[in-house]
Amino acid sequence: MEVVQSGAPFKEGLPDVKVSEVMRRDVATVHPESPITQVVELLLDKDYTAVPVVDNDGEGSWHGQ
């Protein structure tokens, strides 16, 4: 089974797989001060659709501050 699009309905019979078994462990991140060109390069070079933004401690912020 292949899930192609995020948000697409899952078919019955999806295997019992944990996120830890399929997640990336080598995640590229950027800082709020990173140049937008760095983000664009990551998106294009790695074929990403998003890049996590983290502070100097590696923590993300989900509340828009």
Image (cartoon, rainbow, N blue to C red):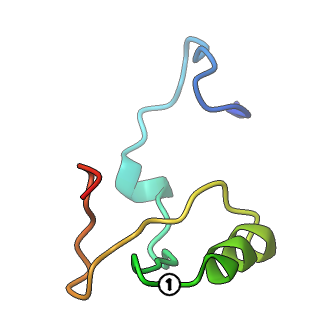
Q: Residues within 10 Å of mark 1 (few under 14, many from 20)?
A: few
- Element at label 1: loop
| Residue under the point 68% across and 61% down | 48
Q: Circle 1 sits on which residue?
A: 34
| Residue under the point 36% across and 45% down | 18
Q: Quadrant of residue 20?
A: bottom left
Taking depth in this image into account, of 24 and 16 the one nearest to the observer is 24
Task: Report the amino acid beneath label 1.
Answer: Ser
Taking depth in this image into account, of 18 and 37 the one nearest to the observer is 37
Q: Quadrant of residue 44?
A: bottom right
Q: Position of residue 16 (x, y in %)?
A: 41, 33
Q: Is residue 57 left or right of residue 13?
A: left
Question: Residue extending furthest bottom?
Answer: 56
Above or below 18: residue 8: above
Q: Position of residue 36 (x, y in %)?
A: 62, 76
Q: Is residue 46 left or right of residue 39?
A: right
| Residue under the point 76% across and 64% down | 47
Above or below 35: residue 12: above
Above or below 49: residue 2: above
Q: Is residue 9 left or right of residue 46?
A: left
Number of numbered labels in the structure image: 1
Taking depth in this image into account, of 4 and 48 the one nearest to the observer is 48
Identify the image quadrant of the N terminus: top right
Q: Is residue 6 left or right of residue 46?
A: left
Q: Position of residue 33 (x, y in %)?
A: 42, 83
Q: Quadrant of residue 17?
A: top left
Identify the image quadrant of the C terminus: bottom left
Q: Position of residue 49 (x, y in %)?
A: 66, 54
